[in-house]
Amino acid sequence: MTIAFIGLGNMGGPMSSLLVRAGHAVQGYDVAAEARQALTAAGGTAAETLTEAVKGAEVVILMLPNSDIVESTVHEAVFAAGTTVIDMSSSEPLRTRALALSLEEQGVTLLDAPVSGGVARARTGKLTIMTGGPRADLERVEPILACLGTTTRAGEVGAGHAVKALNNLMSATHLLVTSEAILAGERFGLDPATMLSIFNSSSGRSGSTENKWPNFILPGTYDSGFGLRLMLKDMRIAVGLAAQVGTPDPLGEAAAGLWARAAEALDAGADHTEIVNWLRKD
């Protein structure tokens, strides 16, 4: 299948390479020349323009920073009737629904399929993919998505983006309170590794105790591959969604506020696991 892959960054780069290895003809575009060159080196075709990338593509995959860029890209591109666009970015659910309706008028199908798992799992094709859209349309593109990870249909269009944002709100809140607890334990004289061992066999365990603290924080590498500001963006999407549907979210709002303070204090490129360093200094 001919696939246009728009956005060849930390996630899109390895994902597009996996599709090439699976035998698909991948036409990729990114504003960064080095990202386009990496796709060429992987066996794909680097397009110099967005128009060139989507020409002749049956499926267009978007892996872009936010809804603003997704919408501007979609409005700039010229899609043939019958094209399927899969937004794998972390976009805003209600804006995704509106965009899908707009594209439907042009005979273009928009599906959402955001991912979880970070760069490491993007490289191995073991991402968790949360999809939104009609079952028949999702089944049609399942062989493509299966090259990248395991899919679960969350619901209609926008559902994937909704559950991705809610997942990251939970993940970020877990990491924040886990870090607060471990730092308090350290001050008391407890060993962090011992605490983690106990937490992971008790009710306090989470992805933060099982993965983030032992693999990225204790070693001091802070290299999970997911930026702190990207985490904050997803948290704000989730908190905004709660407000839009009229659900109280005081803890989510408080957590997002603390992450916003950390984002202001830390370097622009800080990994999200570096929030513990902000807590140490705060």
Image: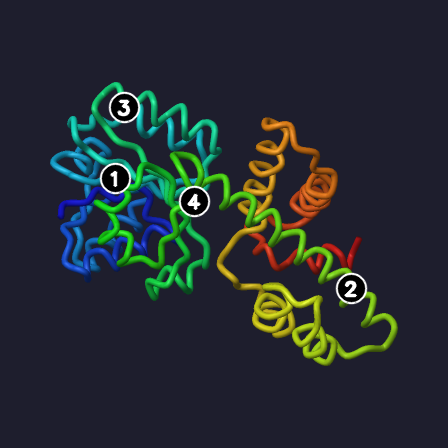
- Circle 4 is placed at which residue position? 154
N-terminal label among 4 and 1? 1
Cα separation, mark 2 vs mark 1, equals: 45 Å
Rate crowding at label 1 as few (under 14), some (14 to 19) or many (20 or more) other CA atoms within 10 Å. Answer: some
What residue is at 73 percent from the left and 57 percent from the top? 177
N-terminal label among 3 and 1? 3
For the residues labelled 4 and 2, say whether their Cβ atoms are less than 8 Å apart: no
What amino acid is labelled 1 in the image? Asp
What residue is at 51 percent from the left and 55 percent from the top? 226
Cα separation, mark 3 vs mark 1, equals: 13 Å
- Name the front one of labels 4 and 3: 4
What residue is at 34 percent from the left and 37 percent from the top? 133
Cα separation, mark 4 vs mark 1, equals: 14 Å
N-terminal label among 2 and 1? 1
What amino acid is labelled 4 in the image? Ala
Using the image, tell me which numbered label, if any, was put on residue 90.
none
For the residues labelled 2 and 3, say whether their Cβ atoms are less than 8 Å apart: no
Q: Secondary structure at mark 3?
A: helix
- Circle 1 is placed at which residue position? 137
For the residues labelled 4 and 1, say whether their Cβ atoms are less than 8 Å apart: no
Cα separation, mark 4 vs mark 2, equals: 33 Å
- Which image quadrant for residue 86? top left
Task: Specify the farthest residue to the right.
Answer: 188
For the residues labelled 3 and 1, say whether their Cβ atoms are less than 8 Å apart: no
The location of residue 271, given as percent across then percent down, is: 57, 56
What amino acid is labelled 3 in the image? Glu
Using the image, tell me which numbered label, if any, was put on residue 181.
2
What amino acid is labelled 2 in the image? Ala
- Name the front one of labels 2 and 3: 3
The location of residue 151, given as percent across then percent down, is: 36, 54
